[in-house]
Image (cartoon, rainbow, N blue to C red):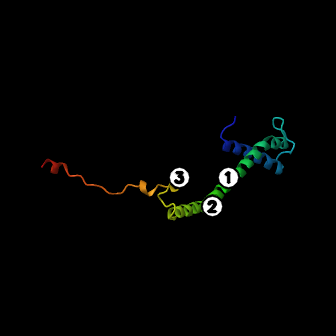
Amino acid sequence: MAGNPQDNSDRINDVLAAWTKAVEDKKMPADKKFRGMTLADFKAKVQPSLTARASLDKLDLDRTALIDQRDDADVVSLAAVQDVLKGVAGDEAYGDDCELYEQMGRKRTSEYASGLTKKKKKAAEEKK
């Protein structure tokens, strides 16, 4: 009978709320049993579901907070990475064409294409 978790939660909470309200409004006695269960028995039986849902909600909030914390820390970390890369590139003993610079995930200056291109003659001009 397990279905969509949200639908299950809605069904549990609907029954719990309606039964609780009926008892509070004195529309039925608190010891009224349905299929052998009183309201207190029903609450005890569904409590594990409610507790698990509350724990998952807390984990979702904690996860979101940790993601935000990580993102904030990454801003500082990536600024430090950029500082180190600029330091290596600007160091006379290393520079932006050294092996260390490449191992840090950057492309050496000597690996870039020069940009120099030689224009080819058109095919019509070659036939002349």
Amino acid type, residue under disc 3 in the picture: Gln
Residue placed at 50% from the left, 64% from the top? 92
Q: Please state which of the two labelled residues, at mark 1 or mark 3, is closer to the viewer.
A: 3
* Amino acid at the residue labelled 1: Arg
Q: Which residue is mark 1?
A: 63
Assess disc 3: are there few (<14), some (14-19) or many (≥20) residues with their C-alpha within 10 Å of its C-alpha: few
The residue at the point 67 percent across, 44 percent down is 6
Image point (71%, 50%), residue name: 59
Secondary element under disc 2, as helix, strand or loop, is helix
| N-terminal label among 2 and 1 | 1
Q: Residue furthest front?
A: 93
Mark 2–mark 1 distance (CA, rounded to whole Å): 14 Å
Q: Nearer the viewer, residue 1 or 69?
A: 69
Q: Position of residue 39 (x, y in %)?
A: 83, 43
Q: Nearer the viewer, residue 67 or 24?
A: 67
Left or right: residue 97 compared with residue 58:
left
The residue identified by callout 3 is 103
Element carrying mark 3: helix
Residue 66: image x %, image y %? 67, 55
Residue type indicated by callout 2: Asp
Residue occupied by mark 2: 72
Mark 1 residue element: helix
